[in-house]
Image: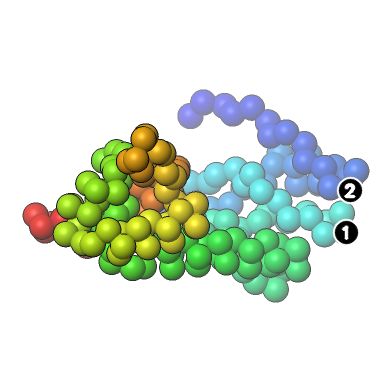
Amino acid sequence: MAEQPPPRSVKADGLADENARKGGVSAPETGKHGAADGDRIEISALRCNFGICEPDYRDMNDMGLPVIDERTSEEEIDQIVSKATTASNFLKAISHEGRLMILCHLVTGEKSVTELENLLSARQAAVSQQLSRLRLEGLVQPRRDGKTIYYSLTDDRPRKILEVVYELFCKDDNAC
């Protein structure tokens, strides 16, 4: 096994963390990140309160999601609530079958409102209403060329979610 360089010193409130000075903090690995069970990994996150630092195991659950517990500060909880609200609004925007189908079609590239009407077999008013909601949520952006309005995805968020939806609901089904 190759020798690893010593970890950087970690400071909390101006005081060097004792564990970092003694060679870093490590913990048993649970099979994540390709390491075998029983291997040890370097903990990169430390929670420090009043100059006392300890490993932050909250980011080490099986799903890679943060764990909220009694050590979570009020500021962190406020940030989580804010992000949960944003995520909830995003999920509400894609929760309608028509909006979801519009996003599925836009994943392949820009489409005019008329193209979307034909692809969805829907009336122009219904398609425009759903596009309006998606635009309000910042998921699609319009582009006008003469009398024709084209829509495209604003960013990669819908594409990423649709990949997961496809994986969960459509992958083994040729209909999707």
Q: Neighbour class for label 2 at 10 Å: few (<14), some, many (≥20)? A: few
In the image, taking residue 147 as reference, residue 137 lies left or right, namely right
Q: Is residue 41 above or below residue 131?
A: above
Query: What is the quadrant of residue 33 in the picture?
Result: top left
* Colour scheme shown: rainbow
Q: Amino acid at mark 1?
A: Phe
Closer to us: 17 or 64:
64
Task: Identify the residue at horizontal 36%, vertical 67% (top origin).
Answer: 95
Q: Is residue 74 above or below residue 18?
A: below
The residue lying furthest to the left in this view is 174
Where's residue 34, x and y in %?
40, 43
Give yes or no for contact between labels 2 and 1 (Cβ–Cβ under 8 Å).
yes
* Residue that appears at 29% across and 43% down: 112
Element marked by disc 2: loop
| Residue type (three-letter) at the residue carrying disc 2 | Asp
Regarding residue 127, the answer to whether it shows in the image is yes
Q: Position of residue 49 (x, y in %)?
A: 82, 59
Q: Nearer the viewer, residue 137 or 80?
A: 137
Image side of residue 73 versus residue 167, left or right:
right
Residue at numbered disc 2: 13
What is the number of the mark on residue 156? none
- For the point 48% across and 46% down, which residue is it? 39
Secondary structure beneath label 1: loop
Residue 111 is situated, as x and y percent measured from the top left of the image, at 28, 42
Looking at the image, residue 96 sits to the left or right of residue 174; the answer is right
Q: Quadrant of the C terminus?
A: bottom left
Residue under the point 16% across and 59% down = 121
Residue furthest toward the right? 14
Residue under pointer 1: 50
Looking at the image, residue 82 sits to the left or right of residue 118; the answer is right
